[in-house]
Image (spheres, rainbow, N blue to C red):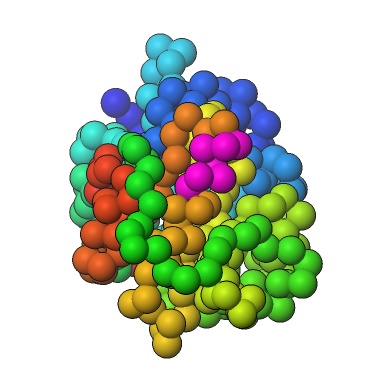
Amino acid sequence: MRPDDWHLTEDLQNFLARAGAFLRSRPDLHTVPLTVTEALRTRGADAYGAEAPVFGRLERAGEVRAAFFRTPPRRLYLTPLTPEEADTLAARLAGLGVLLPGVSADHDTATAFAAAWQRHTGTTPTLHERERLYRLGTLTSPQPAPDGRGRVAGEQDREQLMLWYREFVAAIGGSASGDAGSWADTRIASGRVTLWEVPDGTPVSMAGMTPMVAGQIRVAPVYTPAHLRGRGYAGAVTAEVSRAALSAGAAEVLLFADLANPTSNGLYQRIGYRPIADFAVYDF
């Protein structure tokens, strides 16, 4: 195959017209491209920042075999590729003079692309994070449950959500997908954040979920302030938001967990999540 088998565009509608069916063919492995492109479709091209997103697809004999997107200044995100496909994409982007801060994909794809990027640009990749993608099997509420209850976040929780969103982004060393106010407003309006509150009504943990696309909903983010951890709040609120995703009609409920955090991985498995695939994030 050749580098020019990769087709690049800034036109989301064109990309979805060609690659949409491919992305929907594996809603689990393609959960991030599905949710990001849906956000761009519904909220506009500036949903993740002022710079135009870029999309690409690998197409041979009229069939899409792979795809990618990037919402600058964030990393490149890839669907699964063979080492040869990763190399041709790296060659194509390097040949265009593209500067990348990193890559995120399933483990084998990310590792292959990072090596190819180093060959074509001389840039040294650094492993930033390893994640595991889980799918919900049979939901099991944690026992014993902590005192309190789950509830959907409302307007009265806006300042709390803004604070926790900033803290969450800082804790994972990530990039905010927008300002905290817009993040909170969008999720309050659509009822996509669940809080766990203790009996006196104080919120102690939150779990969000993405809109449903292609039958899948992904739980994200899950956050408990550091001084409140270890009390079962994260498990309780994750079970609550997972139940909400099922009630919304999701055929697949997914989530990512940082493999460097055995506590969260164990927690998710105890409430019914089962591993699908490992992912890796590299910085360049």
Residue 281's spot in the image, x, y percent?
A: 32, 59
Magenta-drawn stretch contains 244: yes
Residue 158's spot in the image, x, y percent?
A: 73, 72
Left or right relative to 205: residue 134: left
Residue 189's spot in the image, x, y percent?
A: 76, 55
Q: Quadrant where the C terminus lies?
A: bottom left
* Residue 215 or residue 18, whichever sits in front: 215
Q: Quadrant where the N terminus lies?
A: top left
Magenta-drawn stretch contains 118: no
* Residue 115 or residue 240, whichever sits in front: 240
Q: Quadrant of residue 146?
A: bottom left
Specify whether residue 130 is in view: no
Q: Does 276 sit above or below residue 77? A: above
Specify start and end residues of the magenta stretch as a single range.
242-248
Left or right relative to 283: residue 242: right
Q: Does 171 sit above or below residue 46? A: below
Q: Quadrant of residue 126?
A: bottom left
Specify whether residue 234 is in view: yes
